[in-house]
Image (cartoon, rainbow, N blue to C red):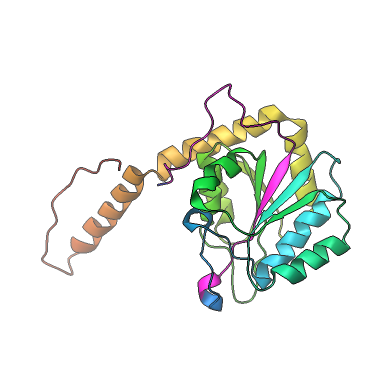
Amino acid sequence: MFNSLSRPEPGVPTREKQAVALASLLAAALLTGLKVAVGLLTGSLGILSEAAHSALDLVAALRQCPASVQLVMVGDGPPAPALARRIAGLQPGGRVHLRARVEHPELASLINSLDVLALVSHTTTRWKEQFGRVIIEAHACGVPVIGSCSGAIPDVVGRGGILVPEADPAAIAAAIQRLHRSPALARKLGCAGLQQVHAHYSWQRVAGHMHQIYLRALNSGTTSHTIHDVKVQDA
């Protein structure tokens, strides 16, 4: 369902890249009532208080990585200024790049410029990571993902990345360095993620799954309605 994003043509580099992690600071925006868009696909990411901890984990991990590794954080919201001050206090040496928002036309270009995307959410007493759509957006571009074990992240990452424990900067740093040292492994994981997108998240696949759900519901014996099979085609 993310066929508006695409990876570069083989052999055509997007740019000269260092190992870059995108901090997708996406949390329960609808539950908190903050007026932010939920998800990269719709135009902006919300930096929420629950996500600030994962941002600081990434900065702490960055300090354990080679100097060539850069960190890009995308998001906006009321906690953003305080978070920026805390990051500055950690003295990352100009290796952290903050962007307030990403509009849809920029999205594929940004994700394609990354070597790895990190979604290292923290589970709280009120929230845990849900689907993590940005993972699929990264996979649609052939970008591997480093994900924490919060909520649905492990299931969505699948074979397309590396899982780390929550709140563990050392494990995040080890995962980043592993991919940094082995471009072949990064390519392998990125390709696996792209295959997962084609297998499970194309418009045709998602529509087909919904069709089957409706069929089961309508034919469960609780209703006399019937539904005819339909041919689902890609948009």
From the top left corner, tell me how far across and down residue 70 is, in percent: 77, 44
Q: Is residue 42 visible?
A: yes
Q: Where, quadrant-wise, is the C terminus in this rendering?
A: top left
Does the stretch in magenta take in 21? yes
Which residue appears farthest toward the top when viewing the image?
11
At x 75%, y 43%, the residue is: 176
In the rendered structure, which segment of residues is drawn in magenta? 2-30
Q: Can residue 167 be seen in this view?
A: no
From the top left corner, tell me how far across and down residue 54 is, in percent: 71, 61
At x 52%, y 26%, the residue is: 9
From the top left corner, tell me how far across and down residue 162 is, in percent: 66, 44
Of residues 230 and 40, the one nearer the viewer is: 40
Asked if residue 232 lies left or right of residue 47, the reply is left
At x 75%, y 67%, the residue is: 83
- By secondary structure, the bulk of the magenta-drawn segment is best described as loop
At x 81%, y 49%, the residue is: 62
Does the stretch in magenta take in 182? no
Asked if residue 216 lies left or right of residue 149, the reply is left
Give the image quarter of residue 153: bottom right
For residue 181, above or below residue 234: above
Asked if residue 213 lies left or right of residue 132, the reply is left
Of residues 139 and 195, the one nearer the viewer is: 139
Q: How many marks?
A: 0
From the top left corner, tell me how far across and down residue 125 is, in percent: 64, 76
